[in-house]
């Protein structure tokens, strides 16, 4: 099994700016998912990108996947204070298809 | 509302005690995952069940055990509790047994061990 490693650990931006967070992983994947967690709440699924996709959009979210570099990025455009949360990536390994392991996340603070 | 129900929401107990956390998955979901999240930490994968059978195990302590019942609800039993077991315990469910689909998380059970 593997987990994603999010980077940076923390990010502070002004409302209206874009936020980019990255995820790296080690082995081949079926897909990679991004989740958001508001403080003390359950995780909420944001987006899933399959290994044969390079980019995916959902509203103000844009996710890219580079399987050659074993990395993904999540871009939140025109951020809002409500985007303040922790963001986690979860790569789904081809070799361990039951576990879904989360990293430590990126803590995003959007200042009003 | 994710459709996943966890009870209790909060639990305060003493060291050495035993507690049971309960999870009801979304209607139609056969798979249940359990995670532990200590203060300001990431999520530690504990265990996964699919249709009543254990499918994957993470860093689950021997003092912890879980099961999934025929009605698909799941229970996580924590015994001989220690201060370090204080954490948020999340349950998540998904339709299939593989980790390729979206997980739906409950709001968690916050355990405080004094």
Image: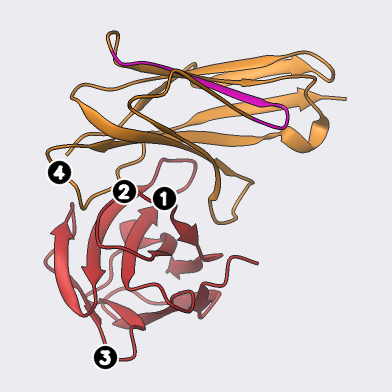
Chain colours: A orange, B red
- Quarter of the image that includes the C terminus of chain A: top right
Check disc 4 and report the residue beneath it: A96
Instruction: Count residues near mark 3 (Cα–Cα under 10 Å), then give few for <14, some for 14-19, many for 20+.
Output: few
SS for dot 4:
loop
In this rendering, the label closer to the viewer, 3 or 1: 3
Mark 4 surroundings: few (<14), some (14-19) or many (≥20) residues within 10 A: some
Question: Looking at the picture, how far across and down is residue B12, in whole percent?
Answer: 48, 76
User: What chain does mark 3 sit on?
Assistant: B
Label 4 to label 3: alpha-carbon separation: 25 Å
For the residue carrying disc 2, how many other residues have a C-alpha within 10 Å: few (<14), some (14-19), or many (20+)? many
Q: Which of A51 and A46 is in front in this view?
A: A51
Q: Where is residue A35 in the image (x, y as percent from the top left)?
A: 52, 41
Instruction: Magenta stretch: give its range.
Output: A58-67
Q: Do the residues labelled 2 and 1 touch (CB within 8 Å)?
A: yes
Query: In front: mark 2 or mark 3?
Result: 3
Q: Is the magenta stretch mostly helix, strand or loop?
A: strand
Tell me the number on the disc at residue B38. Answer: 1
């Amino acid at each position: 099994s593997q987990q994603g490693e999010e980077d940076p650990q923390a990010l502070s931006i002004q409302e209206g700016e874009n936020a980019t967070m990255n995820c790296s992983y080690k082995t081949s994947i079926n897909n990679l998912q991004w989740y958001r967690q508001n403080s003390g709440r359950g995780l909420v699924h944001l987006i899933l990108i399959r290994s044969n996709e390079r980019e995916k959009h959902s509203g103000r979210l844009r996710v890219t996947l580079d399987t050659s570099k074993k990395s993904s990025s999540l871009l939140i455009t025109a951020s809002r204070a409500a985007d303040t949360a922790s963001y986690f990536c979860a790569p789904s390994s081809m070799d361990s298809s039951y576990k879904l392991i989360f990293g430590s996340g990126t803590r995003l603070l959007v200042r009003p | 509302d994710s459709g996943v129900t966890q009870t209790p929401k909060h639990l305060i107990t003493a060291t050495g005690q035993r507690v049971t956390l309960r999870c009801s998955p979304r209607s139609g979901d056969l798979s249940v995952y359990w995670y532990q999240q200590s203060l300001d930490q990431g999520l530690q994968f504990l265990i996964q069940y699919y249709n009543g059978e254990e499918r994957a195990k993470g860093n689950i302590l021997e003092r912890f055990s879980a099961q999934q019942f025929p009605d698909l609800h799941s229970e996580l039993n924590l015994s001989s509790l220690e201060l370090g077991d204080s954490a948020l315990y999340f349950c998540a469910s998904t339709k299939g047994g593989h980790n390729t689909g979206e997980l739906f998380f409950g709001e968690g059970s916050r355990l405080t061990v004094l």
